Image: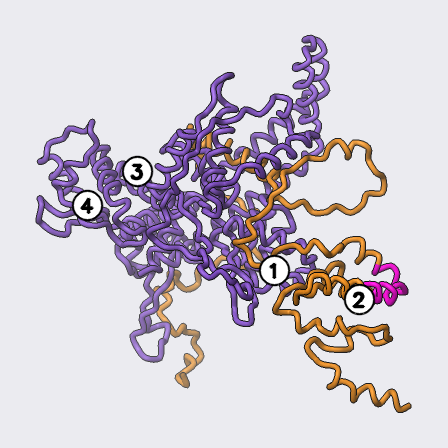
């Protein structure tokens, strides 16, 4: 490594022949930019296989594509409301079969809870932050009635979304169905909700009231 | 999962199930196993949508769930299964060649719906077949059931894992998710059903599904009335068995190309005999004696025992080593070397790609390096008889394309370049992986281009569809020739030409996708066979 640097004469440290070109030969230009997106190819591609089988598979493929769009498994994206209601839209709706999965094979959390009316409630909640406290009481009362009627330990938390809807930046429908048995303890605080001015996010999930009460005390003494 | 695979999965899911399912599916593929709420939170979709999407994905065997501690259920996507969606036409066509239209429709229904009960499949297929038959004839359920049983016997369809029937009457706290079990011996057991009935022809007024709500309602009501005898027993298409069939097909046609028809028939017989006995991942089939093979040859083939023996010896001596001799008892025990066969097929694919991309001289160099394993630059020039400059140019082209790699062998511990041998070599496995990755990219490009072409001409396509619908309805109500002519002229000649071009392009792109998928199958089979060792 600390050998002679050639004593004034330029010499390569390796056998130049091994790399493949001799000294003084013109090397290709240095590439200064990425290769082109659609480079010219020297050789044209081989034509596609053609035959009865291939034709049949092609027709099958195109048919399958169309069929899949009509199956109940194809979930359409809900379109935003158009400014002008087109008359023809009513007559161009494609009627799809309903598909009900076999609930015995799926985890329990997959079942949609029909008790929650998600759509109208969450939208209402977003607009009217003032009505939050009123709906809360109504919901709590309704809840108590329901629980008395059903008498089982399941808690469904519809008022969750009103709570979160009170905050301006609620993700729509994000907090809708919290009916996992495992998640029950995290939302117990909703049951004890009262009309108060505390923002819901003040408490972390899983914290209990007692631990945080010291923080509140500071404000109260003023 | 590589980026190319994820992109391809995203395109496939979007085309087949819509954007919401695509979003959820791709998120799961990217991030691995996740519980429900995390998915909803990370993707920003509503819980309701996430549930629907997951139901669809689980139904189609693209996502599986697992219960972890604390009762949390996690969902995991199977990327390789999503990529199989490309191969659906091939599966259906294979079923058609083996079991004719009935088998084809059974497999198609199973693939379109993910899982179905046998009675549901039989009913639907009978209805569909009745549609295509002439007036007055109907398809009997018994015939469809027979085909279904044959498919199950040859393992082309299999049962899905099922919920075990719990013995205790008091369920206690229900588990968050059912644990599905599957036992090897029950996987192909067809339930004893007595399905009596015939296919129903739909009323002709229900032909097009636009604005016919009563069709939907009537389907619902019939389902609720009859109790399903085989409730809970779901069937799915057994893709591995199809893959085994494709692999056998590829081997037989390779032998036919290399040698002749008779040898390929012999190999086909050997493969058929070991279909059920050999597991699909085995490196070679069970040994078969020459006498057995002679007895199992197809009826039309009358070659004498000695000729058969000669053919077998020829096959065993062939340098490609498709067939190997494993013993001498029973007239000679022969096996088919599946792994070697797959390796040869993958190598042939690589050679052909090099030839088509770089030219036949490059292909010569490539084959030379393959054969000699390691060669120096100088030796390549000598053996291939190609002038030095061109040889070097070609080697570097292939090197930058990752078909060939360099192996350094240092003479001294300090790895000085002047005292190191640089040998060119072909690492088949890594070249195969590189090519596979490229194939995924190609198909993604093809699909995108096809979608682009269709979107560009969307207005024109819609117009032509409307015109066709008008013509069809007018013909049904009996219109004159002149009126039909007028309607047809709504589409001008240049528009017609545009439509023709569009159709041709879309067909070409679709056909290319199918063909690239064949290459993907070969390469994936080869790579899988090396991993299982």
SS assignment at label 1? helix
Q: Position of residue A52 (x, y in %)?
A: 42, 28
Q: Which chain: purple?
A: B
SS assignment at label 4? loop
Q: Which chain: orange?
A: A
Alpha carbon distance from label 4 to label 2? 82 Å
- From the image, state whether disc 1 or disc 2 is nearer to you: 2
- From the image, state whether disc 3 or disc 2 is nearer to you: 2
Q: Residues within 10 Å of mark 4 (few under 14, many from 20)?
A: some
Alpha carbon distance from label 3 to label 4? 16 Å
Q: Are marks 4 and 1 on the same chain?
A: no
Alpha carbon distance from label 3 to label 2? 73 Å
Residue labelled with disc 3: B253
The subunit carrying tag 2 is: A
Q: Magenta stretch?
A: A125-140
In the displayed structure image, the side of residue A121 where residue B379 appears, left or right: left
Residue labelled with disc 4: B318
Q: Are marks 3 and 2 on the same chain?
A: no
Residue labelled with disc 1: A109
Q: Which mark is residue A140?
A: 2
SS assignment at label 3? helix
């Amino acid at each position: 490594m600390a050998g002679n640097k050639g004593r004034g004469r330029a010499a390569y440290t390796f056998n130049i022949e091994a790399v493949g070109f001799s000294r003084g030969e013109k090397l290709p230009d240095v590439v200064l930019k990425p290769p082109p997106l659609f480079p010219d190819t020297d050789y044209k591609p081989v034509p596609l296989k053609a035959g009865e089988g291939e034709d049949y598979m092609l027709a099958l493929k195109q048919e399958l594509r169309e069929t899949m769009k009509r199956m109940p498994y194809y979930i359409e994206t809900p379109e935003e409301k158009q400014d002008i209601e087109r008359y023809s839209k009513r007559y161009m709706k494609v009627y799809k079969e309903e598909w009900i999965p076999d609930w015995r094979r799926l985890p329990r959390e997959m079942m949609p809870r029909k008790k929650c009316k998600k759509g109208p409630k969450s939208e209402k909640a977003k607009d009217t932050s003032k009505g939050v406290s009123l709906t809360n009481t109504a919901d709590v009362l309704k809840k108590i009635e329901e629980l008395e009627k059903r008498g089982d330990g399941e808690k469904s938390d519809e008022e969750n979304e009103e709570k979160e809807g009170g905050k301006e930046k609620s993700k729509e429908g994000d907090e809708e169905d919290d009916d996992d048995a495992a998640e029950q303890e995290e939302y117990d605080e909703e049951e004890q909700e009262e009309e108060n001015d505390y923002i819901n996010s003040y408490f972390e999930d899983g914290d209990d009231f007692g631990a945080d009460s010291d923080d509140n005390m500071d404000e109260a003494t003023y | 999962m590589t980026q190319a695979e994820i992109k391809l999965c995203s395109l496939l899911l979007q085309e087949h199930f819509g954007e919401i399912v695509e979003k959820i599916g791709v998120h799961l593929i990217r991030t691995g196993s996740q519980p429900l709420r995390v998915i909803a939170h990370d993707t920003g979709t509503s819980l309701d949508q996430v549930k629907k999407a997951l139901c669809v994905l689980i139904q189609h065997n693209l996502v599986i769930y697992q219960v972890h501690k604390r009762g949390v259920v996690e969902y995991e996507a199977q990327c390789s299964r999503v990529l199989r969606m490309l191969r659906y036409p091939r599966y259906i066509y294979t079923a058609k060649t083996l079991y004719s239209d009935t088998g084809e429709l059974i497999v198609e229904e199973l693939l379109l719906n993910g899982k179905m009960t046998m009675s549901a499949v039989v009913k639907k297929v009978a209805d569909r077949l009745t549609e295509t038959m002439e007036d007055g004839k109907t398809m009997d359920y018994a015939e469809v059931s027979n085909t279904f049983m044959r498919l199950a016997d040859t393992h082309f369809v299999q049962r899905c894992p099922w919920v075990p029937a719990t013995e205790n009457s008091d369920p206690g706290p229900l588990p968050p998710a059912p644990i599905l079990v599957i036992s090897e011996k029950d996987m192909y057991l067809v339930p004893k059903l007595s399905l009596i009935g015939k296919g129903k022809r739909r009323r002709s007024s229900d032909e097009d599904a636009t604005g016919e709500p009563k069709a939907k309602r009537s389907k619902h009501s019939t389902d609720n009335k009859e109790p399903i005898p085989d409730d809970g027993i779901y069937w799915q298409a057994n893709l591995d068995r199809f893959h085994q069939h494709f692999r056998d097909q590829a081997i037989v046609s390779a032998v036919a190309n290399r040698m002749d028809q008779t040898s390929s028939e012999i190999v086909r017989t050997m493969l058929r005999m070991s279909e059920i006995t050999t597991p699909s991942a085995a490196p070679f089939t069970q040994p078969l004696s020459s006498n057995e093979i002679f007895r199992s040859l197809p009826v039309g083939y009358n070659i004498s025992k000695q000729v058969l023996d000669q053919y077998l010896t020829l096959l065993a001596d062939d340098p490609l080593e498709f067939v190997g001799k494993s013993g001498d008892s029973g007239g000679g025990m022969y096996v088919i070397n599946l792994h070697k066969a797959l390796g040869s097929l993958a190598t042939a694919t690589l050679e052909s790609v090099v030839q088509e991309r770089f030219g036949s001289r490059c292909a010569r160099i490539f084959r030379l390096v393959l054969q000699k394993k390691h060669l120096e630059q100088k030796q390549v020039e000598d053996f291939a008889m190609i002038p030095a400059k061109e040889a070097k140019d070609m080697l570097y082209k292939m090197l930058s394309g990752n078909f060939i790699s360099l192996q350094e062998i240092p003479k001294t511990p300090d790895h000085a370049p002047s005292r190191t041998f640089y040998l060119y070599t072909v690492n088949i496995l890594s070249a195969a992986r590189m090519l596979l990755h490229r194939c995924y990219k190609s198909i993604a490009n093809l699909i995108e281009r096809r979608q682009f072409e269709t979107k560009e001409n969307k207005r024109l396509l819609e117009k032509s569809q409307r015109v066709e619908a008008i013509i069809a309805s007018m013909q049904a109500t009996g219109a004159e020739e002149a009126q039909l002519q007028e309607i047809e002229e709504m589409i001008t000649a240049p528009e017609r030409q545009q439509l023709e071009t569009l159709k041709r392009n879309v067909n070409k792109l679709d056909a290319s996708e199918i063909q690239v998928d064949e290459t993907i199958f070969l390469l994936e089979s080869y790579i899988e066979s090396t991993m299982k060792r």
